[in-house]
Amino acid sequence: MLDFLPQWMKDGVGDDVLFWLGYVTNGKHLSWYASVQYTLAAAVFGALIALCMGLGGAALRNSRFGVARLAGSLYINMVRGIPDVLFFLFFPLAFEQLVEWFRAQALCTPETLAANAGQWPPCDAANWFLGTPEYLILACVSLGIVYGAFAANVISGAMNAVPRGQLETARAYGFSRMQVFWRFQVRQMWAYALPGLSNVWMLIIKATSLLSLLQIADIVLWADRLGAPNFTRSAGLVHPDWRWVYYLVLLLFYILVTFISEKAFAALSRRASRGMAVASSAA
Amino acid sequence: MNKLVLAAAAAIALFATAANAQPVRIATEGAYAPWNFLDDSGKPAGLDVDVGNEACKRAALECTFQVNEWDSIIPNLLAGNYDLIIAGMSVTDERKQSIDFTEEYFPPQPSRYVVRTGTALDFAALSGKNIGVQGGTIQANYAGETFGATNTVKSFENADQALADLNAGNVDVILADGNYLSEVVAGSGGALELVGPDVVIGGGVAMGLRKADDELEGKLNTALSEMKKDGTLDALIIKWFPDKAPGPIFAGG
């Protein structure tokens, strides 16, 4: 792995350092570093779905129609109370079985149904194999649904924080209802919503550590594998329980992501509140 | 909108089915050295992987290994997520009710107890102890039945975690496969030792597959018989379990 280093550099750092450099860059460790992609993908796409669910939920809750308001409130209040771990386990399994149920209606014959009676899936042809890509998509959707409820709450509050007088003035100047909504309410809403949304983003980042529950070989699962004690010489370096070291690295990773996110949200906030009278007074 | 979601779901599902067609997919646990583990390159390795690859070569099958957690390894075989289990799995009557086994590629071996060096245990009247096992193993069943009434049996997801807790002092003793433990004890530098009686539970170790896959079972059995006769299997076993040398284990029999 380290063959590309020139000899003088190898001599300079010594055998110990070379050994450890080689160890933390072996294929196992490279797989660990590469598995960050699942964590980041789940965070980014989970957050995008959460934002869409949030906008939709907020629009429903602030809607003119009673039924839509009820649906929006139900979503926001019920889903916010569901533990993310539980939903993470429930949703992909329920969705898988739903898809298998639909497949069974189309693909199973009475004979294959009888052969598999009392078992799931109803027949072999209906089985839906979930690999890492499928689980990752379902994980993103789960994150999106759970944290979309928080985002909806934040966004709906922010929409109401836009001064009524401005909207009425805009109407009086002849802007259509849609124009008022998009150009005045939504445009100004971001300045009020971003601090709350940054909190939701942090929650999503934290929840990405649950990916291993769905058999995705993410950074947490690899940390478990790499840190587990090994007493068998034929299986590589013999070492005691090192999981704490690997978990520590994960802690530092999450702190780094938090730090970068804070900076990014600060920049976004500055941009969203540019030209607004509220900018100086917004906390 | 609903139709769109359903169509997308159906498309994903159909694509997923079409994608896994031909090669024999083999599941192993990847956390039970030297039976099976992830080597330094992160790929499955160990006796199970060597035996699987050799048998596939002889049966002219294309095989791929994948890692699956132990506690769901049989359900996922039945669900069709893969076609074969090679994971140091002992043949038991209970498992035979749900899956079929090939010929054994490792003879029946006793299970052993391992403790931190210097721990004295009275196995005839064990009480108030924490006993670590890997969930879903023959040892877990045995420990629950034999010691469950007066001791606490702690079930771990994999053997590594059980060992970590033994070292940390959270469990007093672990019951596991004797071959696995003798390698562990040899590598522990005196921190761990084997104690107490040998316990014979279950049969030898074999590959597991769905009851309907008779054709695959036949091919693998033919390959395993050949490997036993010409000594290839013995050589592989000795490669991973040096204390089995010089044999013969299966050869000539």
Image (tube, coloured by chain):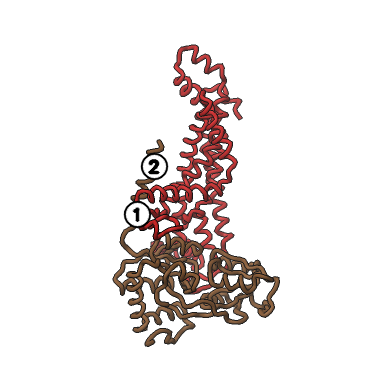
Chain colours: A red, B brown
The residue lying toward the viewer, choosing from B150 and A203, is B150
Q: Is residue A229 above or below residue A57?
A: below
* Residue bearing mark 2: B6
Measuring 49% from the left and 15% from the top, which residue is drawn there?
A170
Quarter location, residue A164: top right
Judge whether residue A82 can be spotted in this image.
yes
| Label 1 chain ID | A
**Quarter of the image with the C terminus of chain B in it:** bottom left
Residue A135's spot in the image, x, y percent? 44, 51
Q: Indicate the secondary structure of the residue bearing disc 1.
A: loop
Residue farthest to the right, as pictured: B128
Q: Are marks 1 and 2 in contact (CB under 8 Å)?
A: no
Q: Indicate the secondary structure of the residue bearing disc 2.
A: helix
Quarter location, residue B3: top left
Q: Is residue A282 above or below residue A204?
A: above
Residue B22's spot in the image, x, y percent? 31, 61
Judge whether residue A190 can be spotted in this image.
no
* Residue bearing mark 1: A109
Task: Say the numbered circle drawn on residue B4.
Answer: none
| Label 2 chain ID | B
Crowd band around label 1 with a 10 angstrom C-alpha radius: few (<14), some (14–19), many (20+): few
Measuring 50% from the left and 12% from the top, which residue is drawn there?
A172
Residue A267's spot in the image, x, y percent? 51, 34
**Quarter of the image with the N terminus of chain B in it:** top left
Rounded to the nearest angstrom, the CA distance separating label 1 from label 2 is 22 Å
Q: Are both tags, 1 and 2, on one chain?
A: no
Q: Given this view, does label 1 or label 2 mark the residue nearer the observer?
A: 1
Amino acid type for the residue under numbered disc 2: Leu
Amino acid type for the residue under numbered disc 1: Thr
Side (left or right) of B189 relative to B62:
right
